[in-house]
Amino acid sequence: MTTAYAPLRLHVPEPSGRPGCKTDFTYLRLNDAGLARKPPIEIEPAETADLARGLIRVLDDQGNALGEWASDVPVEILRQGMRAMLKTRIFDNRMVVAQRQKKMSFYMQSLGEEAIGSAQALALNIDDMCFPTYRQQSILMARDVPLVEMICQLLSNERDPLKGRQLPIMYSVKESGFFTISGNLATQFVQGVGWGMASAIKGDTKIASAWIGDGATAESDFHTALTFAHVYRAPVILNVVNNQWAISTFQAIAGGEATTFAGRGVGCGIASLRVDGNDFIAVYAASRWAAERARRNLGPTLIEWVTYRAGPHSTSDDPSKYRPADDWSHFPLGDPITRLKQHLIKIGQWSEEEHSAVSAELEAQVIAAQKEAEQFGTLAGGQIPSAATMFEDVYKDMPEHLKRQRQELGI
């Protein structure tokens, strides 16, 4: 007897909000602040499964720091973090305007994600190497990289430290532990794992920190990196920034619907955490915990940062075409700057007056840096670097055929 089956069908994940309707954020699997346990550094990876499913949160809606993860975060770190986040947001705002004025070709802001890069940068040592994507400029802000140098890179002008060979926002600052950004997503994970392995082979004490977004977890490099990190216990922090959208594709398309991205780490034998990425204190504490594991030769940690990409994917994107325009105002984890500000005021370490004064100070710094950088050229200004630069920094000894081509150009 033949059993009758219904026709086979595929499941295609859909976001819980589209233009014209309010997003239902219940899919996020949230829990109250202070509930997540803080395990010992030497915990076995399999025993972190509950932390990969839940959500590590410290700051509640009233600005109170609660739970085991709230301890041992110096006030000075919180104040540094506030300045780094404010500087990042102000810088982003100014650079988006500059792009609209055609002074640069392209820009990507990190609106709503400022806590993640700044807190982890402050949790690491300056000689630890970060392998970022294109939305971690807050690492550079926290490490006080000169703004003029950053803006010249964006403008691709004659003072561009990368000489126009990278898209704007794809910085490279070796002395600040910021590895060259790759436009090919997920490569950061295998590069970071490899760098961490090399550090261990040399008997060094430096660790690596690698970053990708939720969408890039669908790339094969993600899985390759997890295998090598697990097998060789590489001293690396593997950061997955789940900001809910990979350009116009909802995070469920990459596999975040029925499970968590942090859960994939546990399945690969890697200690894993799922953390409120808009909670500066939680980000700092989780990053310190993961860094300590790496430094003690206890292996890698995968951290999923739950956040929201408040702005467009880039200046080439219009998110109102695929999600509600007011989504960020309804995102239940709020604004990272507002949340840390509320906490600092509550403990008497900040004020509305200081917030305004620091914002004005940082705005003046960014404006002054932009004016200085623009003196060396902008896209709108028409200054074009010499064609000779395309022959430089490619070979140690220039081959004969390139010498001939350069001579033919008369440069």
Image: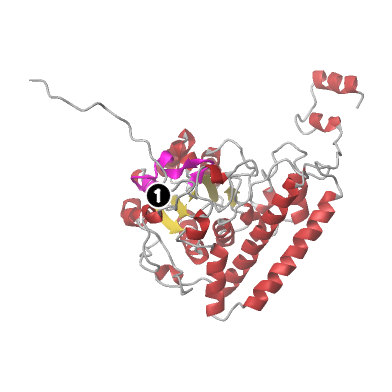
Q: Which residues are magenta?
A: 245-266
Where is mark 1, residue-wise? 262
Residue lying furthest left: 1
44 relative to 205 in the view: left or right: left
Q: Position of residue 340 (x, y in %)?
A: 54, 69
Q: Position of residue 255 (x, y in %)?
A: 39, 41
User: Where's the C terminus, which quadrant?
Assistant: top right
Residue lying furthest right: 410
Residue lying furthest front: 20
115 relative to 27 in the view: left or right: right
Residue 113 is one of the magenta-drawn residues = no
Viewer can see residue 314: yes
Viewer can see residue 236: no
Front residue of 77 and 63: 63
Residue 255 is one of the magenta-drawn residues = yes
Image point 50% across, 54% down: which residue?
327
Front residue of 222 and 241: 241
179 relative to 16 in the view: left or right: right
Q: Position of residue 62 (x, y in %)?
A: 46, 74
Image: 137 above or below 85: above
Q: Position of residue 351 (x, y in %)?
A: 62, 78
- How packed is label 1: few (under 14 Cα within 10 Å), some, or many (20 or more)? many
The amino acid on which the numbered mark 1 sits, given as a three-letter code, is: Ala
Front residue of 153 and 298: 153
Image point 32% across, 53% down: which residue?
49
Image: 51 above or below 69: above
User: Where's the N terminus, which quadrant?
Assistant: top left
Could you tell me which secondary element the residue under label 1 belongs to? Answer: helix
